[in-house]
Amino acid sequence: FWRDAVVRTRVFARVSPLHKQVIVQAYQHFGANGLGDIVVMTGDGVNDAPALKQAEVGIAMGIRGTDVAKDAADIILLDDDFASAVVGIEQGRLASENLQKSIMYTLCSKLPQVAPAFGEVLGIPEALSSKQVLLIDIGTDIWTAVAYAAQPPERSLMSRAPRHPRAEKMANWRVFLYSYGYIGVMQTAFCWLMFFLVTPGIHGFLKNHRELPSGRDYTAEDELTHRRSTTVYYWTLVLGQIAAAICTTTKAQPVGGTSGYGLPNRLLNATLVVEAFFSLLVMGLPPLQALFDMAPLPLHSLILPGLALVGIFQIEEMRKKGSWFFTRV
């Protein structure tokens, strides 16, 4: 009976306090195709108290509600306006969305960070040192990830079906596929492309690296080229992460265009500017260059990696406008 009732019935009339509690339990047990619904119960009287207590979220009226109902509820509407509950739901969804977007952004850089280790197996010199990995994770990414807490909602936030916590985890397969198999792949491709094409003297260095006898150190010239190559890889990854930060501010709505989402999060915008400035500072000051295994780059080696930022952003914008894939992350 109850399995059919939660699917077919929309109105339950003239029910007792016990019946209200049983109805809530039925939705919790049989709803969502057996997974159980997340139930919100509203009420203002003593008769509503058992159901308010049973529901995942009990909402009582602050003005006309009884003390018993208020004690049993989780939330009290001070103005007795159900629109306030809708606003609260939107804020809850927004907090969940922003946390998921922060996870998506953070995971994007992990593939290009680990790719140089596999490159060494293939005989390619170290493209990113452990110090530079820590510099990206702790020096830049962590602050940008925190800034997502201030992200405003997308246009379609309340029109999308809510995420069921038992059916779909916060970090689900779509998140991993988007971060590792999509944005991460593009970042890795741009990092290697810039590593091989933009680094001054890279081809001669690679030849010398292959011919270097075991146990011998690089010459001063080769050491400089090696540091420049890791600097190019690092700088390209930083710009790729800036692109990832802009792209992951929305899941479906384009960022650019007349009806685009734009860049409304000033905190995030500030962290991206600081991230770029901090990276240039590390690459430009000799004491920091020595500390993080970097070397000064010519102007073209600083400008061309910007293709990673532009390319990733444009590809992601085309995806959102055309709804090619990842229509829901």
Image (cartoon, rainbow, N blue to C red):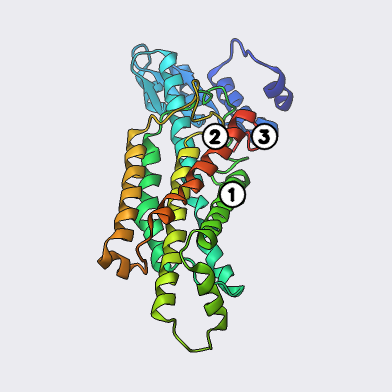
> Does label 2 or label 1 sit earlier along the sequence?
1
**For the point 39% across and 72% down, which residue is it?**
224
Q: Amino acid at mark 1?
A: Phe
**Left or right, 79 with reference to 82:** left
Q: Position of residue 169 (x, y in %)?
A: 57, 43
Q: Which residue is mark 3?
A: 324
Which of the image's four quarters has the C terminus? top right
| Residue 176's disc number | 1
Residue 211 seen by the camera: yes
> Does label 1 or label 3 sit earlier along the sequence?
1
> Does label 3 or label 2 sit earlier along the sequence?
2
Q: Position of residue 145 (x, y in %)?
A: 40, 46
- Callout 1 secondary element: helix
Q: Which residue is mark 2?
A: 251
**Left or right, 45 with reference to 323:** left
Q: CA distance from mark 3 to mark 2?
A: 12 Å
Mark 3–mark 2 CB contact (< 8 Å): no
Q: Amino acid at mark 3?
A: Trp
Residue 44 seen by the camera: no
Above or below, 144 against 199 in this view is above
